[in-house]
Each structure stands twice: as structure tokens, then as C-alpha cells.
Image (tube, grey):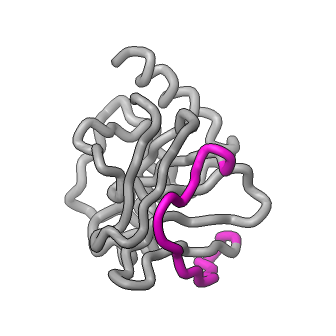
């Protein structure tokens, strides 16, 4: 993955840049991601805070809490409503919504989380890292898998 990565909302009013190599990419199958994306899952790219910058526009924020999870902030475009990222206070990284990247066709998630609520028709690759809920290892295995995928490509 060549840096910097750039992305933004659907209407183009909010743009961002990623200048540090992302920690990992995973597919989240929780019901909140399904609802927020209107899809079977959401793709989340973990990026260290000091490697992420808004370069155009300003986002709106709202706080939410999902069952059994910590409080988060959703960062979204005030004009078109596209979710750009989730921020969890106290964590060193943002969860950038990978579908907002300009170049996303070659993205392959390192694993799948919250599969307990995955849609029944989705078949996950046999060699995937799969978690019924959020990883209890601090996302270490997902980070390690992502790094090995990146070196292989």
C-alpha cells in the first residue's frame, strides 16, 4: 500500500489523508456496522491518530454505544452523511471506514470480527482469522496477519 492514502465522503466536501501505514484492515459483522453501512459488514482500517489528517472540510461527531461495547464517536460528513471513521476515546488508533478510500479495489481484510451476528449466507475464506465478538488480544493477530499480507503483495 503506497502512502499517502487519501479518501473522503461521497459529496467530496470532506477529504482526509493517511500518512502512516495502517495497522490492520478487518471486516466487522456487528449489527451496528450492518445498519450503518446498509451492507452485510463494514470494512475498518485501523490507523494511528498521528497518521490521519483531515485535509478538507470538517466532520460532525455523534456519540454512541453499542451493546457490550465501549462508547465511540462517529465522524461523518455534515452534507452527505457518509461515515468517515469511528473514534474510541483512549485508544491509540481511529477506525477509518475503508470504503471511503479513493483506491479500495485491492483491499483484503486480515480477518472478520463479530461474526456471531454475520448474515447467514456469507461464506468466509477458510484461512481467515474469525472472531465471534471483538478480538480479546488487542487486535494483535489481525495486525500481524495484515503485516504479512502487505509484505506478500
**Where on the picture, by quarter, is residue 125?**
top left
Q: Residue furthest front?
A: 56
**Which residues, given as a range, are shown in magenta?**
49-70
Residue at 58 percent across and 50 percent down: it is: 52
Q: Along the line of sight, which residue is nearer the eye, 98 or 125?
A: 98
Above or below, 128 against 84 in this view is above
Q: Along the line of sight, which residue is nearer the eye, 29 or 149?
A: 149
Residue at 33 percent across and 57 percent down: it is: 99
- Image quadrant occupied by the C terminus: top left
Q: Residue furthest top?
A: 152
- Number of numbered discs present? 0
Whether residue 61 is in magenta: the answer is: yes
Q: Position of residue 129 (x, y in %)?
A: 46, 37
Residue at 46 percent across and 37 percent down: it is: 4
- Image quadrant occupied by the N terminus: top left
Q: Relative to residue 40, is residue 52 drawn left or right?
A: right
Q: Along the line of sight, which residue is nearer the eye, 139 or 122?
A: 139
Q: Position of residue 5 (x, y in %)?
A: 42, 42
Q: Position of residue 47 (x, y in %)?
A: 58, 46
Residue at 32 percent across and 39 percent down: it is: 107
Q: Relative to residue 132, is residue 126 drawn left or right?
A: left
Q: Relative to residue 51, is residue 96 drawn left or right?
A: left
Amino acid at each position: 500500500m503506497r502512502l499517502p492514502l487519501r479518501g473522503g465522503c461521497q459529496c467530496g466536501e470532506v477529504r482526509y489523508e493517511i500518512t502512516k501505514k495502517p495497522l490492520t484492515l478487518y471486516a466487522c459483522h456487528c449489527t451496528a456496522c450492518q445498519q450503518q453501512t446498509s451492507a452485510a459488514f463494514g470494512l475498518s482500517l485501523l490507523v494511528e491518530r498521528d497518521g490521519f489528517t483531515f485535509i478538507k472540510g470538517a466532520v460532525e461527531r455523534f456519540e454512541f454505544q453499542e451493546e457490550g461495547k465501549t462508547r465511540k464517536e462517529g465522524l461523518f460528513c455534515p452534507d452527505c452523511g457518509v461515515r468517515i471513521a469511528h473514534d474510541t476515546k483512549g485508544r491509540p488508533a481511529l477506525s477509518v471506514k475503508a470504503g471511503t478510500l479513493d483506491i479500495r479495489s485491492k483491499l483484503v481484510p486480515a480477518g472478520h470480527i463479530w461474526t456471531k451476528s454475520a448474515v447467514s449466507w456469507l461464506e468466509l475464506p477458510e484461512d481467515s482469522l474469525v472472531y465471534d465478538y471483538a478480538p480479546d488480544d488487542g487486535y494483535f493477530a489481525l495486525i500481524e496477519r495484515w503485516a504479512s499480507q502487505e509484505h506478500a503483495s
